[in-house]
Amino acid sequence: MDFQAYNKILICKSNMKNVAVGDVVIGYEFQIKYPSYRGAFLSCIEDLKFFVDDEEIPAGKISFKLNGKDFLLSELKECFKEYWFVRTPATVFVRQDGGIPSGEHKLRVYMKHRVPYTGYFGQYLVLDSDVTETKIAE
């Protein structure tokens, strides 16, 4: 379905930031929000992909941080009790030695998600959110 009114909130306005442990930069992070006027359980996310400068980030390098907890992308389908409130940003952490170079980068987020309150007769509305924005890495 092509309902995209809330896609504009998927990528948060904050910059991408390198993450260091001591003097060693171990990766970078950015924030996203659930693209709807209602939240949903993480298990409603059917697919979630991230691209930086047109290259897909391997799922094994990503930690999804929400409500004070860290999840692997492969764990989201089982998180039927973990609620993502629409106004709560999730932090996406990417493990990458040295982080991301400072400057502008093209960030693309693709999310395929079920709308949980539309499950009439076993059929759910499934939306695709696909947003690309230029972000500054600090």
Image: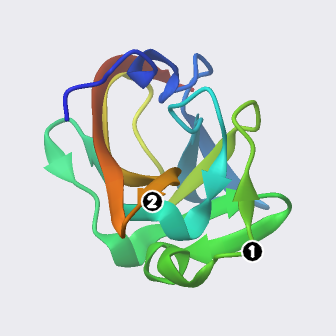
Going by the numbered disc 2, the residue's amino acid type is Gly
Q: Are marks 1 and 2 in contact (CB under 8 Å)?
A: no
Look at the image and tell me whether residue 112 can be seen: no
Badge 2 marks a residue whose secondary structure is strand
Going by the numbered disc 1, the residue's amino acid type is Lys
Q: Relative to residue 101, is residue 81 depicted above or below?
A: below
Q: Which mark is residue 119?
A: 2
Q: Relative to residue 90, is residue 124 depicted above or below?
A: below
Is 14 on the left or on the right of 104, as rendered? right
Look at the image and tell me whether residue 3 can be seen: yes
Tell which circle, 1 or 2, labels the residue nearer the N-terminal end: 1
Is 75 on the left or on the right of 88, as rendered? left
The quarter in which the C terminus is drawn is top right
Is 81 on the left or on the right of 134, as rendered? right
Which is more foreground, mark 1 or mark 2?
Answer: 2
Please state the horizontal and vertical placement of residue 113, each as a whole percent of the image: 39, 53
Is 20 on the left or on the right of 94, as rendered? right
Q: Which mark is residue 50?
A: none
Please state the horizontal and vertical placement of residue 114, each as a whole percent of the image: 41, 55
Task: Write the residue at 69% across / 35% down.
Answer: 86
Q: Which mark is residue 81?
A: 1
Task: Write the residue at 38% across / 78% down.
Answer: 60
Between the C-alphas of marks 1 and 2, the distance is 17 Å
Task: Write the residue at 57% across / 39% down.
Answer: 34
Please state the horizontal and vertical placement of residue 25, each as a whole percent of the image: 60, 56
Please state the horizontal and vertical placement of residue 103, each as a whole percent of the image: 40, 20
Classify residue 16 by image quadrant: top right
Classify residue 21 by image quadrant: bottom right
Q: Relative to residue 104, is residue 124 depicted above or below?
A: below
Nearer to us in this view, 71 or 3: 3
